[in-house]
């Protein structure tokens, strides 16, 4: 039985959308359209389905628009215009060479540019993982354009007193995985060596930060051995989890063999630059209606201090409509538990 902290109840329309979205993705995407537009000085590729109020869907690392494949038909059937973006640095969107072109201000600018290109004044934004960070900050910085926010996995984080990398866990034998990502070329070489193995271990094995096996190890989660790499010691799963198919793996592998991982890794290389740029917004609260969804087995939930952040989320997000916690769900929230996520999103959207 899943554990819920949720304001409101799932309506009939939401339940109907769940049923309709139970069709296989191949059957449900007949009306999906791929488009590329100019936004904020780059080309952004996105996939869209449906008509009605706009909701923009932002993915995390290492993902693509495809991570929202189960939400597109459900949101469309519920009367919304769903747009899943290949974020800057990913897939068929542009991948600028310079590392400093991957800050939160660039990402928020991309979303505003997307709305402008679509001729939409206001929209709802949803994001998972890094996409959730973009969604929170888009809502924080441009509440005139983003009327509500849905965040999966990552809660809203207030600006820390010091640069984030200075307080990330370090040990003599290991470092926190974002620190491993800092040196250009190192993580790229590991992840691109065998892209299929990378996705089997990362998607099939739990999360970027590691699988649930790390919960039993004392000390911080998400650590990378200094004499190894992100995938060191991770077994290749012999079977895929029931939410992931070989066709899904194939899609990710095909795109990342073509593009590499540098674009997505550059997001991590701007963590401290984001901290510097957001100094004027220290202490600022997200004031638009918000929904937070996470899995209780998500390794993000085990990061240092995250339990307190989630427990006190409403202090910094005063119009938080609810926290929806899925039992026995890992990091890849909307892929692992599509029906529950779809229902929660649609119910929230209908109550705006």
Image: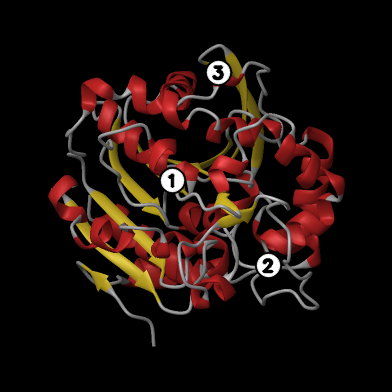
| Residue designated by label 2 | 24
Provide the secondary structure element on which disc 1 rests: loop
Quarter location, residue 239 = bottom right
Task: Give the residue displayed 33% in from the left and 40% down from the top.
Answer: 136
* Sooner in the amino-acid sequence: mark 1 or mark 2: 2
Provide the secondary structure element on which disc 2 rests: loop
Left or right: 306 in relation to 60: left
Residue closer to the observer: 4 or 84: 4
Q: Is residue 42 visible?
A: yes
| Residue designated by label 3 | 101
Quarter location, residue 168 = top left
Q: Is residue 157 above or below residue 201?
A: above
Residue closer to the observer: 341 or 262: 262
For disc 3, the neighbor class at 10 Å (few under 14, some 14 to 19, many from 20) is some
Task: Give the residue displayed 55% in from the left and 66% down from the top.
Answer: 21
* Sooner in the amino-acid sequence: mark 3 or mark 2: 2
| Residue designated by label 1 | 168
- How far from the left and from the top, in percent, is residue 45? 64, 30
- How far from the left and from the top, in percent, is residue 241? 68, 75
* Sooner in the amino-acid sequence: mark 1 or mark 3: 3
Q: Is residue 319 above or below residue 94?
A: below
Q: Is residue 73 above or below residue 270?
A: below
Q: Is residue 203 above or below residue 99?
A: below
For disc 2, the neighbor class at 10 Å (few under 14, some 14 to 19, many from 20) is few
- How far from the left and from the top, in percent, is residue 68? 56, 52
Residue closer to the observer: 122 or 190: 190
| Furthest-bottom residue in this view | 1
């Amino acid at each position: 039985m899943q554990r819920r902290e949720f304001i409101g109840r799932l309506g009939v329309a939401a339940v109907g959308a769940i049923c309709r979205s139970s069709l296989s993705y191949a059957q449900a995407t007949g009306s999906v359209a791929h488009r590329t537009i100019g936004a904020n000085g780059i080309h952004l590729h996105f996939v869209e389905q449906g008509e009605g109020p706009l909701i923009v869907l932002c993915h995390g690392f290492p993902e693509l628009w495809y991570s929202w494949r189960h939400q597109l038909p459900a949101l469309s059937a519920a009367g919304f215009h769903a747009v899943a973006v290949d974020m800057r640095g990913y897939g068929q969107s542009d991948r600028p060479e310079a590392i400093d072109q991957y800050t939160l201000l660039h990402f928020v600018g991309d979303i505003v540019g997307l709305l402008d290109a679509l001729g939409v004044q206001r929209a709802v934004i949803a994001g998972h993982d890094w996409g959730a960070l973009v969604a929170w900050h888009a809502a924080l910085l441009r509440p005139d354009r983003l009327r509500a926010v849905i965040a999966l996995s990552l809660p809203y984080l207030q600006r820390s007193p010091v640069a984030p990398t200075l307080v990330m866990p370090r040990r003599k034998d290991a470092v926190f995985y974002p620190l491993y990502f800092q040196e250009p070329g190192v993580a790229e070489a590991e992840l691109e060596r065998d892209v299929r193995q990378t996705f089997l271990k990362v998607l099939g094995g739990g999360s970027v930060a590691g699988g649930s096996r790390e919960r039993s190890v004392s000390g911080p989660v998400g650590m990378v051995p200094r004499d190894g790499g992100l995938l060191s010691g991770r077994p290749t799963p012999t079977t895929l989890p029931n939410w992931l198919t070989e066709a899904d793996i194939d899609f990710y592998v095909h795109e990342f063999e073509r593009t590499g991982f540098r674009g997505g890794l550059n997001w991590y290389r701007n963590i401290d630059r984001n901290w510097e740029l957001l100094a004027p917004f220290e202490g600022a609260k997200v004031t638009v209606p918000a929904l937070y969804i996470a899995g209780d087995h998500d390794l993000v939930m085990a990061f240092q201090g995250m339990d307190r952040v989630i427990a006190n989320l409403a202090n910094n997000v005063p119009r938080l409509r609810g926290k929806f916690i899925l039992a026995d769900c890992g990091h890849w929230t909307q892929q692992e538990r599509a029906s529950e996520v779809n229902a929660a999103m649609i119910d929230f959207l209908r109550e705006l």
